[in-house]
Amino acid sequence: MTERSEGASEAQTLARRTGTVASFTLASRVLGYVRDAVMANLFGAGAAHDAYVAAHTIPNVLRRLVAEGTLMIAYVPLLAEEREKGGLAAMQRFTAAVLGALIPVLVLLVSLGMLFPEVAVTLFAPGFDADTADLAAQLTRVMMPFLFFISLVAVAGGALNTMGIFAPHAAAPIFLNLSIIGCVTAASGAFDAPITAAAWGVTFGGLAQLILQLPFLRRTGMWVRPRLELQHPGLRTLGRRMLPALFAMGVYQLNMVIIRQIASYMPSGQLTCYFVASRLQEFAIGVFAVSISVAALPTLSEHAARKDAEKVFGTFERAFRATTFITVPAMATLFVLADAIVGTLFRHGRFDAGNGALTAELVRILAFALVPVGTVRVLVPTYYAIGDTRTPVKAATASMLTTAGLGLALAPRLEIAGLTFAILAASAVQAVLLALWLGPELRARVGSAPRRALKGLVGHAIRCLAAALVGTLVTGHLASGRAWFEGDNVENALILGALVTFQGVAYLALAHGLGLTEGALILSALTRRLRRRR
């Protein structure tokens, strides 16, 4: 197989895996919208909802710090190395050792969170009044077991992804959303604080996600019993690699803590508006950008295990192009249709027009973070795959300092909008630094080819922006004349659907005319996935 045909084959594999992850992620994100809309309708944007947001953040930060962040970024490459050295048996032994070391840590963290939730709430939201802080502590106690379940889901997903199976882990969040929706709609009246039902939905959803992984682990031979084997050489290597990753992820999570701390001093409801806006941003990022990085990580790890730096860069290049192809038009769509999206999807029940207008303002700011956030999602795994664990730490530290500095400077005058500007600036700083530092690191390993390729990536991003421009201008003009926070929601939804469809079709057509091939690859992968479901 020639180098070109091999690259084309890998691009098709990446697109196929991305299509699998993206199709399930899309279903999950749609259900996530339904979940957020139901909660906004029932609870509005008030102190109780703010308490839930803060309490939900606590196990999420810990899970990303312990499992989905530091562990997975080191575990998947090492699992690929174990497969190269000893096949399935070596993978089983290594995973058993990982679980044997991880589970006691999880039990300890969950126990501490349930016994002393007030400490965590004080750390994450010191500005809450006494009643809100007490409710947040109660909700934290209910949701802490989620950390245990979802961390094991992360390990299972890493093992299955390394085996080339992506659907179970990608589908897992669907069950979380269904659990929250079911608990909120069926059991809110059973609690003195109705939002407690959502907290139980989180915990039950974590358990459901874990149960989903088990049959696939059995089928692939990766169902193993935890084994306390601290002398396993792979476990030692994992520990060494996790230390820089732990610091980098710790800096990132500290960033999240800073955001919550500053926001907790703002007027009631602003934290909820930011949460809704960030969920819309995550929808745009998650369906494709995160799916691409998830699909690319095992391939990056395989090439790194074989010490093939050229192929590592080739995989990064394809992942970066695909990510940019998605995030650029998504940025444009969120910016010009922020009022339309928020007004149509969330302006009902106790989430009134004032809440919607503030949320739309935050969506417009966060829209510009889509490209840098998507870029970081691809860059960080690439650094770890080529053995550079220090550069992501430096970039994450710069991001944290930017958030803290600008957040403290802007929030007193602009409130939640100022904090959101700080988050945008921090994501841009992190992406720019990682991109600038990647060139020298890669040139040291693979010669002059990456310099030429990196220049090509900039040109690719410019072509994506040009392809998005016409549809954005037309759609923005058509949407600007409508009062999206008034009128019939069904009519608004039909018009919004037509505008999004027009912008999408215009972008794909112009992208094809400009020689951008990612659209055809992704559509082909999604089409094959849908045909297999039938």
Image (cartoon, grey):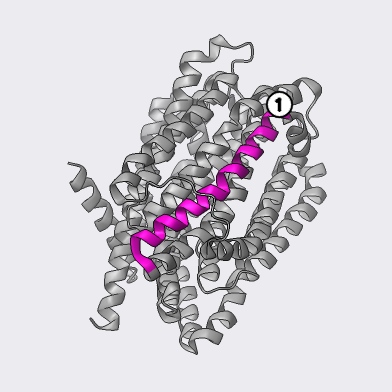
Most extreme residue toward the bottom is 448
112 and 132: which is toward the camera: 112
Quarter of the figure that contains the N terminus? bottom left
Q: Which residue is painted at 53% across and 59% down in the image?
A: 73
On the image, the x and y values in percent for residue 251 come to 70, 56
Q: Disc 1 on helix, strand or loop?
A: helix
Find the magenta span and give its range.
86-115
On the image, the x and y values in percent for residue 352 come to 59, 24
For badge 1, the amino acid type reads Ala
Mark 1 Cα-neighbour bin, 10 Å: few <14, some 14–19, many ≥20: many
Which of the 4 image quadrants contains residue 329? bottom left
Q: Which residue is mark 1?
A: 137
Indicate yes or no whether the magenta region holds residue 103.
yes
Left or right side of 176 for 529: left
Residue 267 seen: yes
Which of the 4 image quadrants contains residue 247? bottom right
On the image, the x and y values in percent for residue 27 come to 37, 39
99 and 45: which is toward the camera: 99
